[in-house]
Image: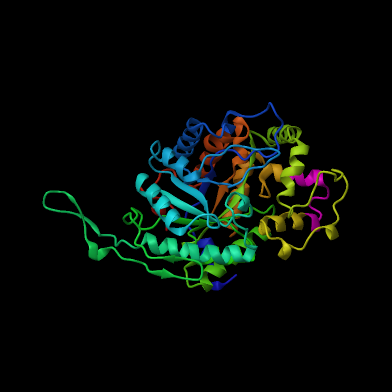
Amino acid sequence: MSEKWGNRISERGPGLVLGQLLGSAGAARKAGDRSAGENLLDIDVFIQQARQAEQAKIHTIFLADTVATSETAPRPSLEPVTLLSAVAAHTSRIGLIASVSTTFTEPYNVARQILSLDHISRGRAGWNLVTSSAGEQNFGKSLPGHDDRYALGAEFAAVVQALWTSWEPDAVGRDERNQQTVDPAKVHRIDWSGRNYSVRGPLNISRSPQDKPILAQAGSSEAGRGLGARVADVIFTTGLMELAPSAALYADFKERAWAAGRSPDAVKILPGVAPVIGSTDEEAQRSWRKIVDDIDFDEGRRALAGQFAGIDFEDVDLDAPIRLEDLPEVASVQGRQSRYEVFRTLIETDKVRTARDLIVYHYSAAGHWFPIGSVENIADQLQERYEHGAADGFNFLAFVLRYDWGFEALTAHLIPELQRRGIFHREYEHETLRGNLGL
């Protein structure tokens, strides 16, 4: 860890950043045991969750997305920017971050959509840059290789940011009759001409209330880390099961940001976490056993195949050891490379051994950290990672919403405990998301 920034960890004041994945990810749940939070087309459910998260003072809600659905287990989902525009009208302070693919859209569209959401929400919007690992069959185009997608995404992000700043902050004013005016001299073409994009600009919407919307990124492969460290304000990382590798991943992102000429403090690292929370450790363990009992392992086989470079698990003995030599090397995977690496490392280090273990792990948090324990126990573990340089905060995953008790445990019990310890704010200090994130 570089001395240029590493000593700041112990000097950070209270400032844990918390995000919440809105909706439910439920990948391998038995039929007939679904919570109300899993009606993925009911806008009232999303509004209720967002309001509850805002009441708990969570910094931002985050909406994942996919541009394809499983043919064997199809699930509906609303388009993120559209959904969050509706949520914006029913909230006032919480941030709204929408995932939009750089592989299957155009920079001008994304710049306009996210900046529109930013104005609608009065400065609370963000864009989660994703490169997509599937869905090409819906767009009549081939899927670029892993590293090519990130190269495309890097230029895409540069164009979007240029469009976001194509209007000067004071381009819009008022005349003596209090009519809105625009100074044409303060609205500029970007004249972008690059390898992948040619965009004249300017954007047809004025500067953000927070100067620029937040740019988030969620890739932890080599290419993903490089891109995130160069351009992202917020990086959603895989929440690893152990402290030491989590701290190493955190340090790597900060070092890369420093090498790119940025202040490491300008990049917030939020690992994913899906805690199973009880009033006692024993109650949490009972809830965990109930969760495992609810898993549909046949559906779990299909869901797992998507994380394992298309390896077919249909005929695999659930309780037979998985042989490492049967798995491809990480660099050869063109899909979700960083997530595959997490699963492969678990097998390599004997943390999991069978397909059944992998399905349980995938169902629990899709490859993220899922601590199990009492409110105080979970708070201890989160505080340890924050204070020992493994996170600037956490992104709570949709897993906690699969059961009726999950979101309530998070917002009504865990967050008040973090506030009592003085590591999480009690009130929003700013009107914009950028301000509340300290950026």
Rendered position, 271 above or below 262? above
How far across and how far down the image is residue 321, in percent? Answer: 87, 50
Q: Please state if 373 lies on the left or on the right of 93 as rendered.
A: right
Q: Nearer the viewer, residue 116 or 438?
A: 116
Residue 251 visible in the shown view: no
Identify the residue at image location x=66%, y=58%: 338
Q: Please state if 180 lies on the left or on the right of 189 as rendered.
A: left
Q: Nearer the viewer, residue 391 or 161?
A: 161
How far across and how far down the image is residue 54, in percent? Answer: 45, 39
Rendered position, 274 above or below 345? above
Decide whether residue 353 is among the magenta residues. Answer: yes
Chief secondary structure of the magenta span?
helix
Q: Please state if 196 lies on the left or on the right of 356 as rendered.
A: left
Identify the residue at image location x=62%, y=37%: 75
Q: Nearer the viewer, residue 308 or 248?
A: 308
Q: Residue furthest left?
A: 176
How far across and how far down the image is residue 238, in percent? Answer: 63, 54
Q: Nearer the viewer, residue 43 or 14?
A: 43
In terms of image quadrants, where is residue 6? bottom right
How far across and how far down the image is residue 291, in percent? Answer: 71, 34
Q: Residue furthest front?
A: 140
- Residues in magenta, as a range: 347-361
Decide whether residue 114 is among the magenta residues. Answer: no
Rendered position, 321 above or below 325? above
